[in-house]
Image (cartoon, rainbow, N blue to C red):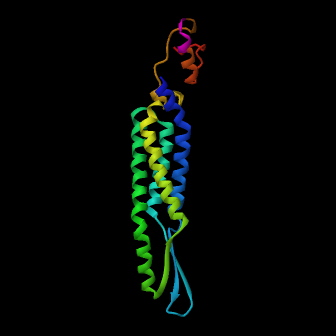
Amino acid sequence: MAEQARARRTFGPVVLVGLAAGIATAVAGDKPAARADGQHDGAGALVSYDAHLPVVTALGLVVLACWGVVLVTRGRVRRAVAGLGALAALGAAAAVVAGFQQVPDQLRDELAQVGVTGAGIGHTAWFWVAAVGALVSVVATLGAVVWVPGWPQMGSRYDAPGAAPAVSAAPPEEQTSLDLWRAIDEGRDPTAAEPE
Protein backbone atom coordinates (compact mmCIF):
# COMPACT_ATOMS: atom_id res chain seq x y z
CA MET A 1 0.00 0.00 0.00
CA ALA A 2 2.84 2.38 0.89
CA GLU A 3 4.57 1.51 -2.38
CA GLN A 4 1.41 2.31 -4.35
CA ALA A 5 1.04 5.64 -2.52
CA ARG A 6 4.67 6.45 -3.32
CA ALA A 7 4.11 5.62 -7.00
CA ARG A 8 0.97 7.81 -7.01
CA ARG A 9 2.95 10.75 -5.60
CA THR A 10 5.45 10.49 -8.46
CA PHE A 11 2.75 11.00 -11.11
CA GLY A 12 2.61 14.81 -11.24
CA PRO A 13 6.32 15.56 -10.87
CA VAL A 14 7.49 12.87 -13.31
CA VAL A 15 4.96 13.83 -15.99
CA LEU A 16 5.71 17.57 -15.66
CA VAL A 17 9.48 17.05 -15.73
CA GLY A 18 9.12 14.62 -18.64
CA LEU A 19 7.00 17.06 -20.65
CA ALA A 20 9.38 19.95 -19.96
CA ALA A 21 12.40 17.85 -20.93
CA GLY A 22 10.69 16.65 -24.12
CA ILE A 23 9.83 20.21 -25.13
CA ALA A 24 13.38 21.40 -24.39
CA THR A 25 14.85 18.54 -26.43
CA ALA A 26 12.56 19.10 -29.42
CA VAL A 27 13.09 22.88 -29.48
CA ALA A 28 16.86 22.75 -28.89
CA GLY A 29 17.34 20.16 -31.64
CA ASP A 30 15.87 22.63 -34.13
CA LYS A 31 18.24 25.43 -33.06
CA PRO A 32 21.89 25.89 -34.10
CA ALA A 33 23.98 23.27 -32.30
CA ALA A 34 27.35 24.63 -33.43
CA ARG A 35 28.58 27.90 -34.84
CA ALA A 36 31.69 28.85 -36.75
CA ASP A 37 33.06 32.23 -37.75
CA GLY A 38 36.07 32.86 -39.96
CA GLN A 39 37.67 34.96 -42.69
CA HIS A 40 36.85 34.25 -46.34
CA ASP A 41 40.10 34.26 -48.40
CA GLY A 42 41.56 36.91 -46.09
CA ALA A 43 39.22 39.52 -47.55
CA GLY A 44 37.76 40.34 -44.16
CA ALA A 45 34.24 39.13 -44.92
CA LEU A 46 32.72 37.40 -41.91
CA VAL A 47 30.98 34.14 -42.81
CA SER A 48 28.71 32.37 -40.31
CA TYR A 49 27.28 28.84 -40.48
CA ASP A 50 25.13 26.91 -38.08
CA ALA A 51 24.06 23.26 -37.87
CA HIS A 52 20.99 21.62 -36.38
CA LEU A 53 20.18 18.23 -34.85
CA PRO A 54 16.99 17.17 -36.70
CA VAL A 55 17.04 13.61 -35.34
CA VAL A 56 17.01 15.00 -31.80
CA THR A 57 14.01 17.17 -32.66
CA ALA A 58 12.12 14.23 -34.18
CA LEU A 59 12.80 11.96 -31.21
CA GLY A 60 11.91 14.75 -28.78
CA LEU A 61 8.52 15.01 -30.50
CA VAL A 62 8.08 11.24 -30.20
CA VAL A 63 8.76 11.50 -26.47
CA LEU A 64 6.12 14.24 -26.16
CA ALA A 65 3.59 12.13 -28.08
CA CYS A 66 4.29 9.20 -25.77
CA TRP A 67 3.61 11.35 -22.70
CA GLY A 68 0.27 12.34 -24.22
CA VAL A 69 -0.66 8.70 -24.77
CA VAL A 70 0.50 7.69 -21.27
CA LEU A 71 -1.95 10.21 -19.81
CA VAL A 72 -4.99 8.72 -21.57
CA THR A 73 -4.32 4.95 -21.55
CA ARG A 74 -4.37 2.21 -18.93
CA GLY A 75 -2.74 -1.12 -18.16
CA ARG A 76 -0.20 -2.81 -20.38
CA VAL A 77 -0.68 -0.35 -23.23
CA ARG A 78 0.28 2.49 -20.90
CA ARG A 79 3.45 0.74 -19.80
CA ALA A 80 4.36 -0.21 -23.38
CA VAL A 81 3.99 3.41 -24.51
CA ALA A 82 6.13 4.56 -21.57
CA GLY A 83 8.75 2.05 -22.76
CA LEU A 84 8.52 3.43 -26.29
CA GLY A 85 9.07 6.92 -24.87
CA ALA A 86 12.14 5.65 -23.01
CA LEU A 87 13.54 4.20 -26.26
CA ALA A 88 12.92 7.51 -28.06
CA ALA A 89 14.61 9.43 -25.23
CA LEU A 90 17.61 7.07 -25.36
CA GLY A 91 17.76 7.60 -29.12
CA ALA A 92 17.73 11.38 -28.65
CA ALA A 93 20.53 11.13 -26.09
CA ALA A 94 22.57 8.94 -28.47
CA ALA A 95 21.99 11.43 -31.30
CA VAL A 96 23.26 14.28 -29.10
CA VAL A 97 26.37 12.27 -28.18
CA ALA A 98 27.00 11.44 -31.86
CA GLY A 99 26.44 15.07 -32.83
CA PHE A 100 29.06 16.30 -30.36
CA GLN A 101 31.84 15.55 -32.85
CA GLN A 102 29.89 15.16 -36.11
CA VAL A 103 28.35 18.63 -36.19
CA PRO A 104 31.67 20.52 -35.77
CA ASP A 105 33.33 18.24 -38.33
CA GLN A 106 30.57 18.88 -40.86
CA LEU A 107 30.85 22.61 -40.25
CA ARG A 108 34.61 22.46 -40.72
CA ASP A 109 34.12 20.67 -44.07
CA GLU A 110 31.50 23.18 -45.23
CA LEU A 111 33.72 26.08 -44.29
CA ALA A 112 36.70 24.59 -46.12
CA GLN A 113 34.62 24.26 -49.29
CA VAL A 114 33.97 28.02 -49.36
CA GLY A 115 37.50 29.00 -48.44
CA VAL A 116 36.94 29.99 -44.80
CA THR A 117 40.19 29.67 -42.87
CA GLY A 118 40.97 30.01 -39.20
CA ALA A 119 37.34 29.36 -38.21
CA GLY A 120 36.57 29.09 -34.52
CA ILE A 121 34.08 26.25 -34.14
CA GLY A 122 32.19 25.57 -30.96
CA HIS A 123 28.93 24.25 -29.55
CA THR A 124 26.13 26.67 -28.80
CA ALA A 125 24.05 26.79 -25.62
CA TRP A 126 21.26 25.07 -27.59
CA PHE A 127 23.44 21.98 -27.98
CA TRP A 128 23.79 21.73 -24.21
CA VAL A 129 20.05 22.32 -23.71
CA ALA A 130 19.39 19.40 -26.09
CA ALA A 131 21.87 17.24 -24.17
CA VAL A 132 20.33 18.01 -20.77
CA GLY A 133 16.78 17.68 -22.13
CA ALA A 134 17.54 14.26 -23.64
CA LEU A 135 19.19 13.05 -20.43
CA VAL A 136 16.27 14.22 -18.24
CA SER A 137 13.84 12.64 -20.73
CA VAL A 138 15.61 9.31 -20.34
CA VAL A 139 15.34 9.48 -16.54
CA ALA A 140 11.68 10.59 -16.59
CA THR A 141 10.53 7.97 -19.11
CA LEU A 142 12.38 5.16 -17.32
CA GLY A 143 10.73 6.34 -14.11
CA ALA A 144 7.38 6.20 -15.88
CA VAL A 145 8.00 2.60 -16.97
CA VAL A 146 8.63 1.63 -13.33
CA TRP A 147 5.87 3.66 -11.63
CA VAL A 148 3.09 3.79 -14.24
CA PRO A 149 1.12 0.81 -12.81
CA GLY A 150 0.52 2.82 -9.61
CA TRP A 151 -0.42 6.07 -11.34
CA PRO A 152 -4.02 7.34 -11.42
CA GLN A 153 -6.01 6.55 -14.54
CA MET A 154 -8.77 8.27 -16.45
CA GLY A 155 -12.31 7.12 -15.63
CA SER A 156 -14.01 4.63 -17.92
CA ARG A 157 -16.48 7.30 -19.04
CA TYR A 158 -13.78 8.37 -21.54
CA ASP A 159 -13.74 4.92 -23.17
CA ALA A 160 -15.33 4.24 -26.53
CA PRO A 161 -19.10 3.58 -26.30
CA GLY A 162 -18.73 -0.07 -27.35
CA ALA A 163 -16.29 -0.72 -24.51
CA ALA A 164 -18.82 0.15 -21.78
CA PRO A 165 -19.58 -2.62 -19.27
CA ALA A 166 -23.05 -4.12 -19.06
CA VAL A 167 -25.50 -1.90 -17.22
CA SER A 168 -26.97 -3.36 -14.06
CA ALA A 169 -30.68 -4.17 -14.40
CA ALA A 170 -31.24 -4.03 -10.64
CA PRO A 171 -33.23 -1.09 -9.27
CA PRO A 172 -31.23 1.54 -7.36
CA GLU A 173 -32.48 0.26 -4.00
CA GLU A 174 -30.87 -3.14 -4.62
CA GLN A 175 -27.51 -1.79 -5.83
CA THR A 176 -24.61 -1.21 -3.47
CA SER A 177 -23.28 2.29 -2.94
CA LEU A 178 -20.19 1.24 -4.93
CA ASP A 179 -22.41 0.33 -7.92
CA LEU A 180 -24.18 3.68 -7.68
CA TRP A 181 -20.93 5.64 -7.55
CA ARG A 182 -19.51 3.60 -10.44
CA ALA A 183 -22.59 4.45 -12.52
CA ILE A 184 -22.15 8.15 -11.75
CA ASP A 185 -18.46 7.93 -12.61
CA GLU A 186 -19.40 6.39 -15.97
CA GLY A 187 -21.75 9.28 -16.68
CA ARG A 188 -25.00 7.34 -16.12
CA ASP A 189 -27.88 8.27 -13.84
CA PRO A 190 -28.33 5.23 -11.54
CA THR A 191 -31.84 6.38 -10.54
CA ALA A 192 -33.14 6.60 -14.11
CA ALA A 193 -35.23 3.72 -15.39
CA GLU A 194 -33.31 1.48 -17.79
CA PRO A 195 -34.73 1.22 -21.33
CA GLU A 196 -36.58 -2.01 -22.07
Q: Toward the viewer: 152 or 178?
A: 152
- Residue sitting at x 50%, y 54%: 133
Q: Is residue 152 visible?
A: no
Q: Toward the viewer: 151 or 167?
A: 151
Q: Main secondary structure of the magenta part?
A: helix
Number of numbered discs: 0
Q: Is residue 131 above or below residue 4?
A: below
User: Residue 114's spot in the image, x, y percent?
Assistant: 46, 86
User: Residue 131's spot in the image, x, y percent?
Assistant: 48, 58
- Residue sitting at x 60%, y 18%: 189
Q: Is residue 59 above or below residue 103?
A: above
- Residue sitting at x 54%, y 14%: 178
- Find the magenta span and give its range: 174-179
- Residue sitting at x 50%, y 68%: 33
Residue 130 is a magenta residue: no
Q: Is residue 10 above or below residue 105?
A: above
Q: Dividing the picture into quarters, in which one does residue 177 lie?
A: top right
Q: Is residue 44 visible?
A: yes
User: Residue 170's spot in the image, x, y percent?
Assistant: 51, 9
Q: Is residue 109 left or right of residue 39?
A: left
User: Residue 139's spot in the image, x, y percent?
Assistant: 45, 46
